[in-house]
Amino acid sequence: MKKDIHPPYEKTTITCACGSVYEVGSTKKNMKVEICSNCHPFFTGKQKFVDTGGRVERFKRKYGRE
């Protein structure tokens, strides 16, 4: 393996929009995610509609459908 070409691997925290915080190893620092295993419908068994950033509205504007 070549030396000095890989980013440093260190402990970081992942913060979810629901408030859950996980400590993992990664090459990125302090990531924020919108959904995690605590609030994902597959793991919770509860279905909820997640429209982040108005994706549905942007689609309707882009393609002119209502």
Image (tube, rainbow, N blue to C red):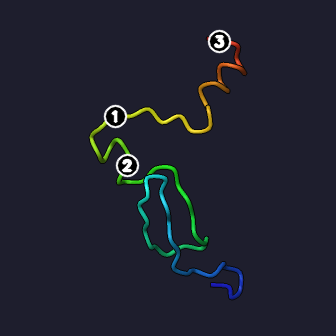
Hey, which quadrant is residue 59 in on the image? top right
Q: Quadrant of the N terminus?
A: bottom right
Q: CA distance from mark 2 to mark 1?
A: 10 Å
Q: Mark 1 highlights which residue?
A: 47
Q: Which residue type does callout 2 highlight?
A: Cys
- Seen from the viewer's position, the closer of residues 40 and 5 is 40
Q: Amino acid at mark 1?
A: Gln
Question: Can you identify the residue that label 3 sits on?
Answer: 65
Indicate which disc, 1 or 3, sits on the residue closer to the N terminus: 1
Badge nearest the viewer, 2 or 3: 2
Q: Residue at x 68, y 88 (%)?
A: 3
Which residue extends farthest left?
45
Residue lying at 70% horizontally and 13% vertically, measured from the top left: 64
Q: Secondary structure at mark 1?
A: loop
Q: Residues within 10 Å of mark 2 (few under 14, many from 20)?
A: some
- In this picture, residue 4 sits left or right of residue 8: right
| Labelled pair 2, 3 in contact (Cβ < 8 Å) | no
Element on which disc 3 rests: loop
Instruction: Answer few, some or many: residues within 10 Å of disc 3's Cα (few below 14, many 20 plus, some between 14 and 19).
Output: few
Image mark for residue 64: none
**CA gap, disc 2 and disc 3:** 31 Å
Instruction: Find residue 4 and report its horizontal and vertical position in percent.
Output: 71, 86
Residue occupying the point 44% across, 73% down = 23
Label 2: element kind? loop
Name the image quarter holding the C terminus: top right
Q: Is residue 43 above or below residue 65?
A: below
Q: Residue at x 50, y 65 (%)?
A: 14
Identify the residue at the far bottom of this view: 3
User: Mark 2 or mark 3: which comes first in sequence?
Assistant: 2
Q: Nearer the viewer, residue 3 or 34?
A: 34
Residue with the mark numbered 2: 39
Q: Are marks 1 and 3 in contact (CB under 8 Å)?
A: no
